[in-house]
Image: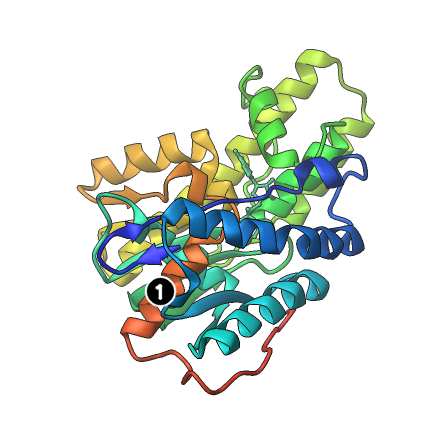
């Protein structure tokens, strides 16, 4: 829950990791059923934590997509219903806009314009962000997203879901460079990415047989390869746009090695890198509320009487 003077007044996440862990990935039907069960209690909890009543709400923002249709529809139907009942606007938000603006919620936020590196389970993109709603795509992945590559590689190494954090933990016990993996498209001259070949290279290494130390070395090399590419392309995007501020958003932005490397490289270039608070790196409602508040303030929200359930899974 976001207040335009007081900032983030409450936020809560109900994680479904435990629910999906036994299946090694997200089960769409279980996800949407759990949304149905959780959404009203979560809404009540956030209101109570913020110490406000529903009548004080100016607008209700919700994730319109991309995502799983069933889960999106639960949120959209609920948000549109609350807004309708209160006579307030409902604001559909693109999931990535939430991630993109999330570093602005920190105590020391960047100023527009900045370059954003969006690295989640579904997306890998570099954008130029000039203002709320003014985004220019500079480059994106041609196949797997960075988080997806982490998750698939983790699975190949026999690690539990969600793979990214598990793989990062294993990588800490290994040494990069002992096994050699490619840095796909690092020198392609554009700002696009490709991660599917990396996953195949990992599969080949796994098939040759690995002991415990070899697994950790492979994890470390994989992480280093992804980080090399993400860092290289981010720096190229800053050069191309002549900007000095980089914002990193999305779940992979929680990766410690990525942060270390970006901090170092940007400091050497007298630039700065901004991250959302760790709790706001992975999916959360606070960033959606914030994006909604920014749109409302910028006059980009729908009028209060225009209620339609607008979800776009892709
Ligand atoms: O943004 P997010 O929470 O959800 C999506 O919108 O996809 O990102 C989730 C992704 C997953 O692929 C997860 O494995 C990855 O972020 N991730 C990480 C780390 N923490 C989460 N990847 C690498 N290192 C991490 N520490
Ligand atoms: Zn996300």
Mark 1 close to ligand 2, CB under 8 Å: no
Q: Position of residue 117 (x, y in %)?
A: 41, 52
Ligand 1 occupies quarter = top right
Decide which of 236, 4 is in the foreground and name it: 4
Whether residue 31 is visible to the viewer of this picture, yes or no, is: yes
Splitting the image into 4 quarters, where does residue 298 fall?
Answer: bottom left
Identify the residue shown where x is 44% and y is 39%: 279
Whether residue 201 is visible to the viewer of this picture, yes or no, is: no
Query: What is the residue that sits farthest to the left in this orientation?
Result: 270
- 168 vs 110: above or below: above
Q: Position of residue 38 (x, y in %)?
A: 64, 50
Decide which of 177, 144 is in the foreground and name it: 144
Splitting the image into 4 quarters, where does residue 5 fall?
Answer: bottom left
Identify the residue shown where x is 30% and y is 80%: 299
Identify the residue shown where x is 43% and y is 77%: 89
> The C terminus is located in which quarter?
bottom right
Decide which of 29, 199 is in the foreground and name it: 29
Q: Position of residue 4 (x, y in %)?
A: 26, 60
Q: Position of residue 119 (x, y in %)?
A: 50, 49
- 283 vs 36: above or below: above
Q: How many marks?
A: 1
What scheme was used to colour the molecule?
rainbow
Q: Is residue 120 left or right of residue 159?
A: left
Identify the residue shown where x is 72% and y is 64%: 70
Decide which of 311, 84 is in the foreground and name it: 84
> The N terminus is located in which quarter?
bottom left
Secondary structure under the numbered disc 1 in the rendered image:
helix
Q: Is residue 121 left or right of residue 304?
A: right
Crowd around label 1: few <14 · some 14–19 · many ≥20 (10 Å)? few
- Residue holding disc 1: 56
- 264 vs 41: above or below: above
């Amino acid at each position: 829950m976001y207040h335009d003077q007081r900032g983030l007044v409450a936020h809560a996440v109900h994680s479904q990791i435990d629910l999906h862990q036994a299946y090694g990935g997200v089960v769409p039907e279980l996800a949407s059923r759990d949304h149905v069960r959780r959404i009203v209690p979560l809404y009540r909890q956030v209101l109570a934590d913020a110490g406000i009543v529903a009548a004080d709400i100016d607008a209700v923002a919700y994730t319109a997509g991309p995502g799983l249709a069933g889960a999106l529809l639960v949120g959209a139907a609920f948000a549109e219903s609350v807004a309708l009942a209160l006579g307030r606007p409902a604001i559909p938000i693109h999931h990535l806009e939430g991630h993109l603006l999330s570093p602005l919620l920190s105590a020391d936020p960047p100023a527009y314009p900045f370059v954003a590196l969006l690295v989640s389970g579904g997306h890998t993109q570099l954008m130029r962000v000039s203002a709320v709603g003014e985004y220019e795509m500079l480059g994106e992945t041609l196949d797997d997203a960075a988080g997806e590559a982490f998750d698939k590689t983790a699975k190949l190494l026999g690690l539990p879901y969600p793979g990214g954090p598990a793989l990062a933990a294993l990588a800490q016990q290994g040494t990069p460079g002992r096994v050699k993996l490619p840095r796909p498209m690092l020198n392609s001259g554009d700002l696009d990415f490709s991660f599917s070949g990396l996953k195949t290279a990992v599969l080949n290494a796994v098939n040759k047989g690995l002991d415990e130390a070899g697994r950790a070395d492979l994890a470390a090399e994989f992480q280093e390869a992804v980080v090399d590419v993400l860092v290289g392309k981010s720096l190229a995007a800053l050069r191309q746009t002549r900007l000095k501020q980089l914002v990193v958003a999305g779940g992979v932005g929680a990766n410690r090695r990525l942060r270390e490397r970006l901090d170092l490289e940007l400091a050497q270039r007298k630039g700065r890198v901004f991250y959302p608070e760790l709790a706001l790196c992975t999916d959360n409602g606070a960033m959606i509320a914030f994006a909604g508040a920014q749109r409302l303030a910028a006059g980009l929200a729908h009028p209060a009487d225009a209620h339609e359930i607008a979800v776009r899974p892709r």
